[in-house]
Image: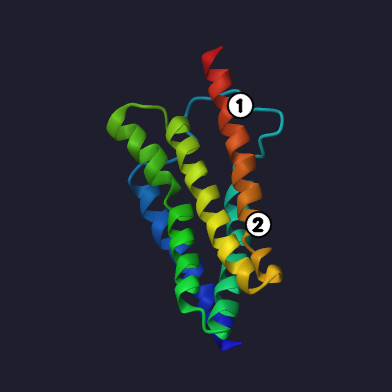
Amino acid sequence: MVGLLVNLLLFYAILFLINVPAYFLGLRFEGNEKRKRLWFEPPGFVIPLVWVFLFFLLAILRYNLMLIQESNLASMTILLALICSSYAYYTLGLEKLTGISALKFGLFGNILVILAALWVGRKVSDLSAGLSYLVFPIVVWTFFATMIILGQLRLSKN
């Protein structure tokens, strides 16, 4: 039980310590201007709640991988968490640096997250199909977020 708690603390620390500085660097997703929302786009407060849940699943996955002494694969869950939690930097941060829409960077970032999650899920499935299901929600959520980005890009062209 201590190991699970340590993993939960580790993943929530990653989520917190990477995302809090982004806010203070001015990397915020909701600006002052109102934009048209897609009919299926969730309210902004839902997104961090979903990621808290997804990081909970990653912590459980890493805990189980450590129990079966798969430390290399357990390290891949940390890398996946780092990619996921760095979203504000490679979308809003790169937008500030380049002037290219954060939506476009988000599209490429989401593809990276999906591919990384599928890769981790595939590797985990070689060990346990049940454990691989802990990665699948990241793929589903990120695919959903990609549909939102595509919708927003379409709206911005009109």
- Per the model, the C-alpha gap separating discs 1 and 2 is 23 Å
Q: How is the image coloured?
A: rainbow
Q: Disc 1 designates what residue?
A: 151
Q: Nearer the viewer, mark 1 or mark 2?
A: 2
Q: Taking 69 as reference, is 43 left or right?
A: right
| Mark 1: amino acid | Gly
Task: Find the residue positioned furthest to the front.
Answer: 126
Q: Taking 19 as reference, is 36 left or right?
A: right
| Residue 98: percent from left, percent from top | 29, 30
| Residue 109: percent from left, percent from top | 46, 42
Q: Quadrant of residue 104?
A: top left
Q: Is residue 51 visible?
A: yes
Q: Taking 129 as reference, is 70 left or right?
A: left
Badge 1: few (under 14), some or many (20 or more) residues near its Cα, within 10 Å? some
Task: Find the residue positioned furthest to the top.
Answer: 158
**Nearer-N-terminus badge (1/2):** 2
Which residue occupies 56% across, 65% down? 123
Q: Disc 2 designates what residue?
A: 136
Q: SS class of the residue under badge 2?
A: helix
Q: Quarter of the image for the C terminus: give it.
A: top right
Q: Quarter of the image for the N terminus: give it.
A: bottom right
| Mark 2: amino acid | Phe
Which residue occupies 34% across, 37% down? 94
Are the residues tagged 1 and 2 within 8 Å (C-beta)? no
Q: Is residue 45 visible?
A: no
Residue 141 marker: none
Q: SS class of the residue under badge 1?
A: helix
Which residue occupies 32% across, 26% down? 99
Compare residues 29 and 14 and report the one nearer the observer. Answer: 14
Compare residues 143 and 129 and report the one nearer the observer. Answer: 129
Which residue occupies 45% across, 71% down? 75
| Residue 80: percent from left, percent from top | 48, 59
